[in-house]
Image (spheres, helix red, strand yellow):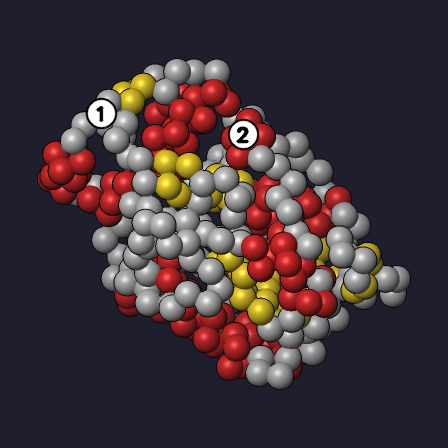
Amino acid sequence: MRFLHTKTGGHSTARRILVTGASGFIGQALIQHLAHAGYTVTALSRQPLTLPRVRCVSIADYADGDVLAPLLAGQDVVIHLAALAHQRNATAVAFDSNVRTTEALARACAQAGVGRLVLLSSIGVYGPAQAGRPFTETSPTTPTEPYAVSKLACEQVVAHELAGRDWVIIRPPLVYGPHAPGNFGQLQRAVARGAWLPLGRATPLRSFVGLDNLVDFIALCAVHPAARQQAFVVADGEDVSTADFIRAIGRALGRPARLLNVPLSLLRGLAGLLGRAETVDKLLAPLQVDARLARLELGWTPPYTLAQGLQRAAVPTPAI
């Protein structure tokens, strides 16, 4: 097995990587990145997937240890992306599957002798943000949303099941990119069709991470020796308000961003009446991330600026 050189000049013998949640927004981009880099990739997903130069496997239940065992045999790294993501009006019970799946996968990785498990978590594990106080890896974890509660439980499961072994946890904020789900996709579509958005007064600073930057960081965490048993926050490193983020989306699309300066109290009231209070609160709240540990420990710098990332998000990414 030949050595792989990391960005910092370290070495890794990892060549075989399995990715769960491979058919998702992040998963498909990560698989393309890894395949281009020369890894032998196994793409695991509930949805049927066909990609060149990638072994694609459909799985009905990620918690089925008997199914996982032969798939994990011989893998150097497992990157766990599969999870039930944000669902409107979902209760904590709806996200129990995230914890059960992660527990089964971590145990199967330990039994199969997998070299490293990388878990994609969420910045939500820190709970509500405060203006001027960026989250770091040492910030207290006090999640309030059911999804974030489940992701923190997944982190704890990984640390417990793989105690003394090799794991890495990554906590991203909102991820933007081509065909993104969630708030970014809705904002991009609204700007593209020329809709007026009542977010001109959404001025608190927020951190974001572009899909290509996140994928680059995940790939680095998969192989870098210094990432062992560490949790990392990750971001583009350019904090902007939601209003300015929308304006930047407009520039990337070549469309004017139409913003209305609606008083925030009125906006929150209307959002509550329409059942969109949670979505609007996220767009209005501050959320900053200080990702300097990734730079200091791993030598990582985002390969794309915010403007470049949004430009790349405006067009489909090429297939491998």
Q: Three-letter amino acid code at disc 2?
A: Ala
Q: Position of residue 78 (x, y in %)?
A: 64, 65
Can you tell which quarter of the image residue 218 is in? bottom right
First-in-chain label (2 vs 1): 1
Q: Residue at x 29, y 45 (%)?
A: 285
Q: Secondary structure at mark 2?
A: helix
Q: Which residue is mark 2?
A: 307
User: In percent of the image, x 64 and y 47: which residue is there?
Assistant: 301
State how far apart marks 2 and 1 are (Cα).
Answer: 24 Å
Instruction: Give the residue furthest to the right.
Output: 2
Q: Quadrant of residue 260?
A: top left
Is the N terminus in the top left, top right, bottom left or bottom right quadrant?
A: bottom right
Q: Position of residue 68 (x, y in %)?
A: 60, 71
Q: Amino acid at mark 1?
A: Asn
The residue positioned 58% from the left and 30% from the top of the image is: 308
Residue 320 placed where, x, y %? 71, 38
Q: Residues within 10 Å of mark 1 (few under 14, many from 20)?
A: few
Q: Nearer the viewer, residue 156 or 302?
A: 302
Mark 1 — residue? Answer: 261
Residue 61 appears in the picture as rendered: no
